Amino acid sequence: MLMLNHSDDAPVNRFYLVRHGAHDEFGQLLSGRAGQSRLSEAGLLQARKLADWASRANASTVQASPRKRTQETAAIIAQAQGLPVETVNALDEVDFGAWNGRDFAELEEDPLWHEWNSRRASAITPGGEQMADAVTRVTAHLERAGEVPGIAPAMIVTHCDIIRGVIAHYLGLSLDNMLRFDIDPGSVSTVDIGHGHARIIRINEVPA
């Protein structure tokens, strides 16, 4: 359990870190911040299952990255709860720089891509951001939100590597090890934040 800076009366809030549903570029392109594809039929089904899951979890807040795939997923979840979607730039995808929108087959020929995937704690993207910087902006947002009474349970709709990085951070793992677990499309990973602590409850739960 990670110790955080906090006030003594900070509440404990539960955050459901949701990976968006599958989309038309899934598995072909590194969509990053360039991708504008819509959810596929599979992704729409995943979003509807997430909406049902959120109802059972009594979600009171829905926040999302500004990317189209996260916005569409969040909209389906939020509509089922009668909630608005709050767009939060801090939840955005990793900025992959020149890799945004590139074909994965092309990236496999780039030595820097392989270095990035083996040394996430220190490798950099070409003109983008380091993984550690992405994790810092997201965890800072969650920890600020974790001080707000009534915000939780909150559905936080974001991206695969963002969720991996956040979980690795709160487990005390090096970001070099963040690819050792999966975060599937349409999955939920649960973290409690408050009273100066962060506790991982579940990882990669896929609603049935």
Image (cartoon, rainbow, N blue to C red):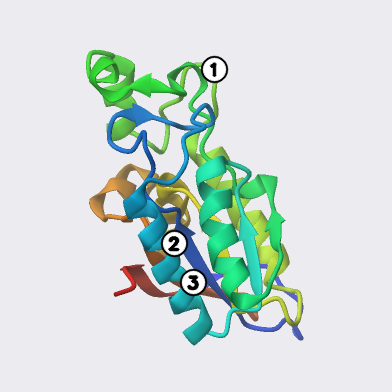
Spatial CA distance of label 3 from label 2 is 6 Å
196 or 54: which is nearer to us? 54
Which three-letter amino acid code belongs to the residue tagged 2? Ala
Residue on which the image places disc 1: 127
Is 125 placed left or right of 83 in the picture? left
Q: Total marks drawn?
A: 3
Disc 1 on helix, strand or loop?
loop
On the image, the x and y values in percent for residue 173 come to 37, 56
Q: Nearer the viewer, mark 2 or mark 1?
A: 2
Q: In this rendering, is residue 132 above or below 200?
A: above
Q: In this rendering, is residue 149 above or below 23?
A: below
Labelled pair 2, 1 in contact (Cβ < 8 Å): no
Residue on which the image places disc 3: 51
Disc 2 on helix, strand or loop?
helix
Q: Nearer the viewer, mark 1 or mark 3?
A: 3
Residue 89 disc label: none
> Mark 2 or mark 1: which comes first in sequence?
2
Q: In this rendering, is residue 149 above or below 71?
A: below
Which residue is rendered at x = 57% and y = 73% of the image? Answer: 80
Labelled pair 1, 3 in contact (Cβ < 8 Å): no
Residue on which the image places disc 2: 47
Q: Is residue 172 visible?
A: no
On the image, the x and y values in percent for residue 43 come to 38, 53
Q: Quadrant of residue 75?
A: bottom right
